[in-house]
Image: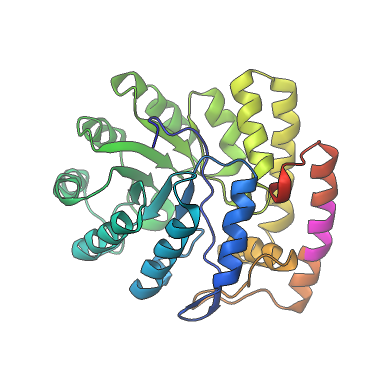
Amino acid sequence: MNRPLTGIVPPMISPMRGRDELDAAGLERLVERVLAGGVSGLFVLGTTGEGPSLSYRLRRELVERVCRQVRGRVPVLVGITDTAFVEALTLARCAADAGAQAVVAAPPYYLPGGQPELREYLRHLVSELPLPLFLYNMPALTKVAFELETVRAAMDEPRIVGLKDSSGDMAYFRDAAALLPQRPDWSLLVGPEEHLMDALLAGGHGGVCGGANLFPALYVALFEACRAGDLSRAHALHAQVIRVGEALYRIGRHPSAVIKGLKCALSCLGVSDDFMAEPFHRFRADERALVERRLEALRADITALGLHRGEGA
């Protein structure tokens, strides 16, 4: 894995056919779809992948299948976030055995830790991890952030190699970017795709964008335009990224609508099943019909932008 890791690293959905059953054929199609779009890596078992909702057995199977299929074409990052320290380590060792290149951990959720406790947790974790570690800042779901002082301290540990920031707080992101001279090999990646362009222009290295499950070439093109300084092209692509979110992520009344929208759209395209891990459920018929209509319009818009990178367009 090159350091810093740059580009688009989709947080892959986890295609499922039942409560503890992967959609294996759908997973294979999804992996090839995103790779065809020119992505720089894959992130499995993140929020979009419903990682904490899957059984430990299913998590291991998913990691093993993805790594076996990817065969080193791009780095595979594996989410190991867990309330149990030992389970996080167990999954990290499984990831290493399968051939993954790094692991990703958010603060343990449920009982929120203080920053001194988080720093100690990271010291203990990294001392036993078999792979490099990315921090995952997701305070909306974990109830606690990796504050900047904790990030600064983490940069002193060579085996912690980056930060994925999904806080949506661009002031925090810019402050994190200001720390980059301390670690030339440190990767700073943004989660919320509506902030991808701003994050890249602020010095970020790339994005972990859910929409890249569907249209990876769109997000790769936006990354490339920003890196080339082609702001006119970047603004046009950014506007299309915003349209993807508006069309697919706001159907329904609950936060799970984002993942439901992505899974439903991929199902409409014949890529993978849209089964959701409990307690969530797939979109009903009326919602699916709305996704189908909006997806057709999105595909036409993206084609008009000249994106034809295989299935990933």
Locate residue 171 relative to residue 117 in the image: left or right. right
Q: Quadrant of residue 225?
A: top right
Observer-nearest of 69 and 92: 69
Residue 275's spot in the image, x, y percent?
59, 75
- Across the whole image, how many numbered discs are drawn on residues? 0
**Residue 254 seen from this side:** no
Quadrant containing the N terminus is top left
> Which secondary structure dominates the residues rendered in magenta?
helix
- Where does residue 55 sit, x and y in percent of width and height? 37, 75
Q: Name the residue at 14% across, 49% down.
A: 124
Indicate whether 91 appears above or below 275.
above
Q: Determine the residue positioned at 56% across, 68% down.
A: 15
In the displayed structure, 122 sits above or below 205; it is below
User: Does residue 31 show up magenta in the picture?
Assistant: no
Q: Which residues are magenta?
A: 292-298
Magenta includes 295? yes
Point 81% across, 58% down: residue: 294
Residue 136 location in percent, x, y?
Answer: 37, 46
Front residue of 130 and 291: 130
Q: Is residue 142 left or right of residue 245?
A: left
Q: Is residue 95 visible?
A: yes
Q: Residue at x 43, y 49 (%)?
A: 76
Please determine whether, in this image, residue 147 is positioned above or below residue 88. above
**Image coloring type:** rainbow
Q: Is residue 286 left or right of residue 70?
A: right
| Quarter residue 308 falls in | top right
Q: Position of residue 201 (x, y in %)?
A: 56, 23
Q: Quadrant of residue 180?
A: top left
